[in-house]
Image: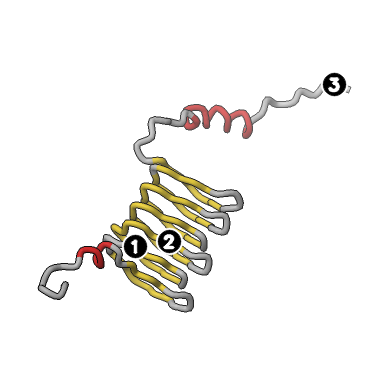
């Protein structure tokens, strides 16, 4: 609260949750603000505006936020509008996104699903045909000697 009982909106809007290097937290965070992680976090982060995982940061869990910037390591599930994996960043798991940017040398291992995408794969329609060709090729004919 401000000096005269009014809420200081500037402080609330600019507030950040910081997990410092050398700190390990297990649990959950729900904030409309920003989260910056240089330490280790295991758990769930919900409804944050911006989450930044610094170069020394490590997150294992689920994230649901507006923006995610990864310089360190993330392992788990992401549901964000924008995901930016920087050159030192590593993401393992599943990403649901509207915009995904992976810088050169940034790493992503897993499954990416673009929200509200109109693109549909037809691979499953022919997968069985492909498997039949690979698994059971035509028998070889032997001639009489």
Q: Are marks 1 and 2 in contact (CB under 8 Å)?
A: yes
The x and y percentages for residue 1 are: 16, 73
Image: 5 above or below 139: below
Residue 94 lies left or right of residue 28; in this view the side is right
Does 79 sit above or below residue 31? above
| Residue wearing tag 3 | 144
Q: Which residue is mark 2?
A: 52
- Residue 97, image x, y percentages: 39, 45
Q: Residues within 10 Å of mark 1 (few under 14, many from 20)?
A: many
Q: Which of the two discs, 1 and 3, labels the residue nearer the N terminus?
A: 1
From the image, tell me which residue sits under label 1: 34
The answer to which quarter of the image holds residue 133 is top right
- Residue placed at 54% from the left, 51% from the top? 109
Mark 1 element type? strand
Residue 48: x percent and y percent?
A: 31, 59
Q: Which mark is residue 119?
A: none
Taking 90 as reference, is 43 above or below it? below
- Nearest to N terminus: mark 1 or mark 2: 1
Check whether the beta carbons of the residues at disc 1 and disc 3 lie within 8 A of each other. Answer: no
Instruction: Name the residue located 50 percent from the left edge and 56 percent from the top edge.
Output: 92
Q: Height in image: 109 above or below 26?
A: above
Q: CA distance from mark 1 to mark 2?
A: 8 Å
**Which of 85/64 is in front?**
85
Disc 2 versus disc 3: nearer the observer: 2
Query: Which secondary structure, mark 2?
Result: strand
Q: Residue at x 46, y 72 (%)?
A: 39
């Amino acid at each position: 609260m401000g000096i005269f009982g009014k809420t200081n909106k500037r402080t609330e809007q600019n507030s950040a949750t910081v997990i410092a290097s050398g700190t390990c937290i297990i649990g959950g965070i729900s904030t409309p603000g920003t989260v910056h992680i240089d330490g280790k976090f295991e758990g769930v982060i919900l409804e944050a505006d911006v989450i930044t995982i610094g170069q020394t940061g490590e997150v294992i869990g689920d994230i649901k936020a507006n923006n995610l910037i990864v310089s360190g390591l993330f392992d788990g599930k992401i549901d964000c509008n924008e995901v930016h994996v920087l050159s030192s960043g590593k993401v393992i798991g599943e990403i649901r996104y509207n915009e995904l940017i992976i810088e050169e040398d940034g790493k992503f291992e897993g499954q990416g699903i673009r929200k509200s995408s109109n693109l549909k794969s037809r691979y499953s329609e022919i997968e069985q045909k492909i498997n039949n060709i690979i698994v059971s090729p035509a028998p070889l004919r032997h001639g009489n000697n």
